[in-house]
Amino acid sequence: MKLYSGPLSMFGAKAEIAVREKGLDFELIMVPFEMKALYQPKHPEVLRINPKRQVPVLIDGDLEIFDSTQIFEYLETIRRDPTLWPTDPAARARARLLELKSDEVYFPSIVRLMGLQGTPDDAAAVAARAAARAFYAEMEKCLAHGDWLAGGYSYADIAFFMAQLFGERMGATLTDDHPRLQAWRDRTGARPAVSFVAATMGCYLQAQGRTLPAFLDKLST
């Protein structure tokens, strides 16, 4: 098994955490990345397999797939233990929806903030942070009756942990209004697979002279 990722790929980190949580043997291949040029030149295997020209890409024997959610589904099929989707159909549907919302509702606001770091008072930046806070409020409610977002620890937790890591870096921070989320983030970050991947990303950022949020700094030291 080979996983193609990048040092600052949120989606690649999601996939890597999942493979590590499953305890699978794999080769991690980091594609070329540089802060100014970003992912240029594109890795030829990524170009060949993914028409979107993005990581993550997973190769397992003659299977070649891309997209972190599709990788989640494949891993759950080939290695059921430990399970990372709930077994109850309704709970599984809720977990899948949370994973989707993390990627497609929450994270787009964080992507907008990435281009507005020099103008934090810009109306678009203010709106993006407000959207993130609204999502945090929703996730805070999800944690009212348990330690994890969708019952047991799941892909939903993996997805939102990595997305929120980027949110924290971009100024969409958790506050005293989010005590359950802060405790959840500590629990999630304490898992060996999550800690390893997040710390590796943190060390890369430090090497580039970037300041880390406090929770990521702890994982990276």
Image (spheres, grey):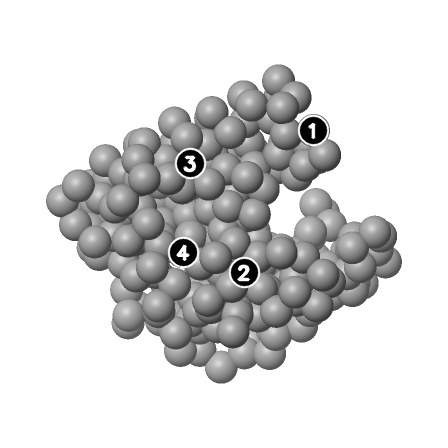
Q: Which mark is residue 101?
A: 3
Other residues around mark 4 within 10 Å, as few (<14) / some (14–19) / many (≥20)? many
The answer to whether marks 3 and 2 mark residues whose Cβ atoms lie closer than 8 Å is no
Give the number of the mark in front: 2 or 1: 1
Task: Report how far apart the C-alphas of labels 3 and 2 lie in the structure.
Answer: 17 Å
The amino acid pointed to by label 4 is: Ile
The answer to which of marks 3 and 2 sits earlier in the sequence is 2
- Against 121, residue 142 (above or below) is below
The quarter in which the N terminus is drawn is bottom right
At numbered mark 1, what does the secondary structure look like: helix, strand or loop? loop
The answer to which of marks 1 and 4 sits earlier in the sequence is 1
Can you identify the residue that label 2 sits on? Answer: 13
Residue 3 visible to the viewer: no
Can you identify the residue that label 4 sits on? Answer: 158
Task: Report how far apart the C-alphas of labels 1 and 3 lie in the structure.
Answer: 27 Å
At numbered mark 3, what does the secondary structure look like: helix, strand or loop? helix
